[in-house]
Amino acid sequence: MSKLIYSMIASLDGYVADESGNFGWAEPDASVHAFINDLERSVGTYLYGRRMYEVMSWWETLGDLSELPPHIADFATLWRAADKVVYSSTLSGISTSRTRIERDFDVAAVQRMKAESERDISIGGPTLASAAMAAGLVDEYQLFVAPVIVLVSPCPCGMPDPSQVASDPAAE
């Protein structure tokens, strides 16, 4: 039986993207990327929502991998070799190999996938992952925290809005 793994990079204040949907601040350096690559080696299938799939499909568009930094080429190779399942009611087609679309997130189907797969399964994207968490499907969490504060309010992690916090907490 495989594990369902939720792996994500978040800011110190719990975000995976800023107000504009950008996440460039989360790009790991070469050593962290290589560490994450090593964790990804057990994954045989990625489960994505539409938005995460559209972001991750970039890994299929890279040209000659021999011209890229080793940690980038390594992840591209791992990603391309894995199966991908995209959960979307709106996506009309796919642009990557080894990929299929499912219109609904079916808990029983994911349970069967976990039971039958010899390799681990990774789930990506906070919306899809939250459905898997609510169903009790996630076996392992891999959280990587980028040393930045995104300052989007309200914060999903319960931290106060930074604009409402006194600059000198001792004065309170």
Image (cartoon, helix red, strand yellow):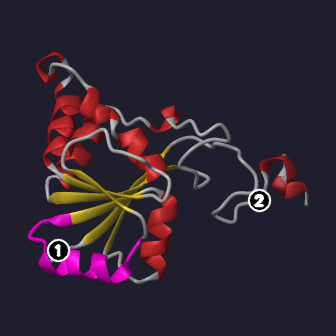
Q: Quadrant of residue 42?
A: bottom left
Residue at 44% across, 76% down = 133
**Residue 50 appears at what percent x and percent y?**
45, 51
Rendered location of residue 45, percent (x, y): 21, 59
Position of residue 32 measured from the top left corner of the image (x, y, whole percent): 30, 41
In the rendered structure, find residue 160 and report the number of the disc placed on it: 2
Q: Secondary structure at mark 2?
A: loop
Q: Nearer the viewer, mark 1 or mark 2?
A: 1
Closest to the observer, 97 or 81: 97
Name the residue nearer the viewer: 171 or 153.
153
The residue carrying mark 1 is 2
- Residue 26 seen: yes
Range covered by the magenta-colored residues: 105-120
Which label was assigned to residue 48? none
> In the rendered picture of this protein, how many numbered marks are placed on residues?
2
Look at 18% across and 66% down and name the residue there: 120
Residue type of the residue flagged with mark 2: Pro
Q: Main secondary structure of the magenta part?
A: helix
Q: Earlier in the sequence, mark 1 or mark 2?
A: 1
The amino acid beneath tag 1 is: Ser
